[in-house]
C-alpha cells in the first residue's frame, strides 16, 4: 500500500511548479484566446496547459493512476487511485486580472479522498492535507475557526451564475446572512473559499451547482482541519451532489438550518 507521507512532497512540488506557470501567464491571455464552454464558463490555453502538466507529473508519481479533470485533456477513468483536478479554479478572476485563483488537486483511493492540495497562486499559499497527516498551509498547521454564534461569523459563498432554478431560496439565505452575520464574501474560487474555511479565515462556505473538481481537495482539507462538510440535506453527498456547506461544527449547523428553511420549506 502506498504511503501518502512519501508522495506528498512530490505532489506539492509539482503543484508549485504548475502554479509558477499559471503565474507567468497573468495578463498574457488575449480576448481571442478565451473560449466560453457554456454560459459564463470560461477557459483558455492556460487552464488546459496547466492540466496537461499536472496530469503528466501525477502520472509519474503514481503510475497507473486515473483521472477526473475539468478540462478533459486526459481519458476520464475510475481506477483504484484517482486524481480529481481543477487546473485553474477561479478562471474568471484570472482572465479579469483579479488575483484570486488556485490549482485544486485531490487524490482518491477506492472512491474516498485521501489527499488534497489547494494552491492559491496570488498569495502563494499552498493548503494541503493527507489522511492521518493533518491540515497545513505553507508548513504551518491549520484548523477551522471556533466561532460559536452567527453574529461572529464571516461567511463565503459563490453566487449562481448559470443555474438559476433555486435562486429564490438562495437570495433568502443571503438576506438572512446579511442580517445575522459579520458579512458575506464572494471571492470567485470555491477551492480557495474551502481552503480559507480550513484555515479559520471564513467560518463557513456554501454554494450550489459546483462540480467535484471544485470541491474535492478543499472539502478534504476542511475535514482534516476539524470542520464539517455536507450537502444541503446535511448528508455526505457534497462531491457529486452539486451542493456544499463547510464550516466549523457550530456555524455549519446554523448555516444548514438557514439553508434548509429557505430551500426546503
Ligand atoms: C468556479 C469557481 C467559482 C464558483 C464556480 C466554479 P472555475 O470554477 O470555483 O468560485 O462559483 O461555481 O465553477 O470555473 O473558475 O474553475
Ligand atoms: Ca472550478
Ligand atoms: Ca477551472
Image (cartoon, rainbow, N blue to C red):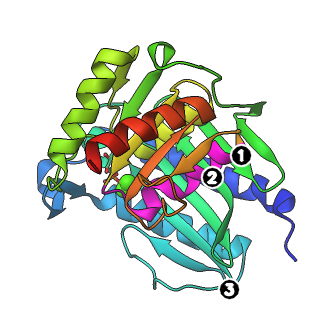
Would you name the residue on which mark 1 appears?
224
Indicate which disc, 1 or 3, sits on the residue closer to the N terminus.
Answer: 3
In the figure, is residue 175 to the left or right of 50?
A: left
Please state the extent of the stretch shown in magenta in the rendering: 209-224
Gap in Å between the C-alphas at discs 3 and 2? 23 Å
> Which tag is nearer the camera, tag 1 or tag 3?
1
User: Which numbered disc, 3 or 2, marks the residue closer to the eye?
Assistant: 2
| Residue 216 is one of the magenta-drawn residues | yes
Quadrant of image for the N terminus:
bottom right
Comparing 68 with 16, the one in front is 68
Residue at disc 1, secondary structure: helix
The reply to whether residue 24 is visible in this rendering is no
The residue at label 3 has a CB less than 8 Å from ligand 3: no
Left or right of 218 on screen, residue 71: left
Q: Is residue 67 above or below residue 177?
A: below
What is the chief secondary structure element of the magenta stretch?
A: helix
Instruction: List x then y, in percent, for residue 184.
Output: 34, 23
Residue 66 lies in quadrant: bottom right
Find residue 93 and report its horizontal and vertical position in percent: 29, 38
Is 90 rendered above or below residue 49? above
Q: Tell me whether circle 1 and circle 2 mark residues in contact (CB < 8 Å).
A: yes
Q: Which mark is residue 220?
A: 2
Which label sits on residue 64? 3
Residue 77 in the image: state x and y as whole percent.
Answer: 51, 86
- Tell me where residue 5 appears, x and y as whole percent: 85, 57
Amino acid at each position: 500500500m502506498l504511503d501518502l507521507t512519501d508522495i506528498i512532497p512530490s505532489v506539492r512540488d509539482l503543484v508549485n511548479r504548475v502554479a509558477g506557470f499559471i503565474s507567468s501567464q497573468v495578463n498574457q491571455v488575449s480576448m481571442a484566446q478565451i473560449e466560453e464552454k457554456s454560459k459564463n464558463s470560461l477557459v483558455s490555453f492556460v487552464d488546459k496547459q496547466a492540466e496537461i502538466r499536472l496530469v503528466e507529473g501525477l502520472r509519474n508519481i503514481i503510475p497507473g493512476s486515473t483521472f477526473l479533470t475539468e478540462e478533459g485533456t486526459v481519458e476520464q477513468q475510475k481506477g483504484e487511485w484517482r486524481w480529481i483536478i481543477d487546473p485553474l479554479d477561479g478562471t474568471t478572476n484570472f482572465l479579469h486580472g483579479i488575483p484570486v485563483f488556485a490549482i485544486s488537486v485531490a487524490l482518491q483511493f477506492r472512491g474516498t479522498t485521501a489527499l488534497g492540495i489547494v494552491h492559491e497562486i496570488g498569495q502563494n499559499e499552498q493548503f494541503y492535507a493527507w489522511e492521518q497527516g493533518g491540515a497545513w498551509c505553507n508548513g504551518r498547521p491549520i484548523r477551522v475557526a471556533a466561532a460559536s454564534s452567527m453574529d461572529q461569523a464571516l461567511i463565503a459563498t459563490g453566487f449562481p451564475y448559470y443555474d438559476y432554478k433555486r435562486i429564490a431560496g438562495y437570495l433568502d439565505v443571503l438576506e438572512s446572512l446579511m442580517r445575522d452575520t459579520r458579512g458575506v464574501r464572494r471571492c470567485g474560487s470555491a477551492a480557495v473559499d474551502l481552503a480559507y474555511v480550513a484555515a479559520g479565515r471564513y467560518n463557513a462556505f456554501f454554494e450550489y451547482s459546483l462540480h467535484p473538481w471544485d470541491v474535492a481537495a478543499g472539502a478534504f482539507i476542511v475535514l482534516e482541519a476539524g470542520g464539517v462538510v455536507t450537502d444541503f440535506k446535511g448528508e455526505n453527498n457534497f462531491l457529486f451532489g452539486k451542493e456544499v456547506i463547510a464550516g466549523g461544527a457550530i456555524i455549519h449547523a446554523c448555516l444548514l438550518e438557514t439553508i434548509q428553511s429557505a430551500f426546503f420549506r
